[in-house]
Image (tube, rainbow, N blue to C red):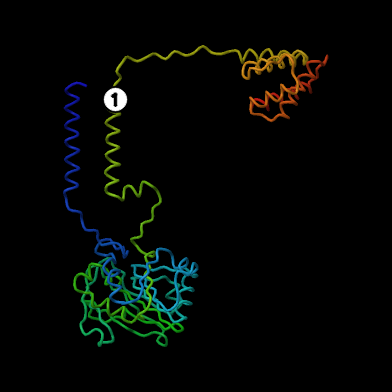
Amino acid sequence: MDKKTKLYIGLFVTLLLGIIITEIAKPIPIDWTPSYKSEHKKPFGCYVLKQEMAELFPVQSIETLQKSPYLSFTEGDVSDSSNYIFINDYLNFDTQELNQLIEYTEKGNNVFMAAHSFSDNLLDSFGLGLDGGRSYYEDTVLASFTNKAISPIDTFYQKGIFLVYFDSFDTLNTEVLGHITSKESKEEKINYIRIAVGNGYFYLNTLPAAFTNYHILNGQDNYVSNALSYLKETRVYWDDYLKSGRVIIKSPMRYVLNQQELKWAYYLGIVSLLLFVIFRAKRNQRIIPIIKPLENSTINFTRTIGSLYYQTNDFDEITTKKINFFLEYIRSNFYLDTQNLNEQSAKKLASKAGKNVEDCKKLLDTIIFLSSKEYKTEQDLINLNKLITAFKK
């Protein structure tokens, strides 16, 4: 390697190290994407709320469910006398899941849902109408409860908040628990309701961001505790499956690129491989000319001779030569004596060739028979050829 090449390599390595150090040293940008996952500490994760659930429901077990509601119910993970909590920007349930939730609530349990949007089958089942949230822009809203005894102080929200509210509902089975008021319109809208279903209740709230780390740590935890105070102080099931931040890995590379350490190792490996290819691509000796091997015309010659025999209907000669060639094949490849073919020869051939003894015996018996036959027919030749071909497969 000459000095010029070494200089280029040194400059490249220095530049690469500089980029890596810069990437490592720079602060990690804040991830504002909503996830609502209980283990995420990003602003719109639910790590803080999940940790505080034991304070909101003292002496009660808090269980995290990492599977769909359908599997949670069918596999017996959810028991009665409990609360089932769903928090996400959008909650979508299929017909079976919704029926299971309704049946679960009718037994006297509670289901709490906080989301910007709910599936159509849920809204239709309870005769609900949802409005607002048409804009991509965040709103500044004032959140309050109808029961002033539990919420003497109103709460302002801005970051990650969208003005979504219920504009219609069944007044016979539905109770209004809270409102939101837009800073611009000053018009009070319903955002928190309770629907009586059998002996239990469905609680629906349209401010899921209020339950995230960002707002709880900014002194707005009062709203969360008051909203959840309607639930019974009993066992709580926390849904961690219907989440926007749930990672769905479809390929190994997606997982590698999502992990910073593995991503850098992957890129470094690619760069190293490219460097190796670039600097080893230069030949260390002159080009060696390609010499084509002599063409083996034995097969073509054999086919020509065989065709001549076949056209003259000399089946006797073809059969004899085919037998001789096959016996030579046995001697050369399996080192067996072919002077006296018998049942013992068939067993030895089957053992060395890894074939069935009966097949080998049939083949050798056919050879013995044809060798002693004075006139061979076309059918004899065909049968012999099939047996030899089957043996050589």
Residue occupying the point 37% across, 14% down: 288
Query: Circle 1 is placed at which residue position?
Result: 280
Task: Give the residue type at disc 1.
Answer: Arg
Quadrant hosting residue 330: top right
In the image: residue 305, left or right of residue 216: right
User: Residue 369, image x and y in percent?
Assistant: 80, 19
Q: Quadrant of the N terminus?
A: top left
In the image: residue 337, left or right of residue 191: right
Q: Is residue 129 above or below residue 299?
A: below
In front: 285, or 78?
78
User: Residue 305, image x and y in percent?
Assistant: 68, 12
Q: How many marks?
A: 1
Residue occupying the point 56% across, 13% down: 296
User: Residue 199, image x and y in percent?
Assistant: 45, 84
Considering every residue shown, the one lying at the far front of the view is: 344
Quadrant hosting residue 130: bottom left
In front: 293, or 362?
362
User: Residue 321, image x and y in percent?
Assistant: 71, 13
Quadrant hosting residue 374: top right
Q: Is residue 155 above or below residue 333?
A: below
In front: 267, or 157?
267
Considering every residue shown, the one lying at the far right of the view is: 374
Residue occupying the point 25% across, 88% down: 149
Q: At numbered mark 1, what does the secondary structure look like: helix, strand or loop?
A: helix
Q: Quadrant of the C terminus?
A: top right
Disc 1 crowd rating (10 Å Cα; few below 14, some 14-19, many 20+) is: few
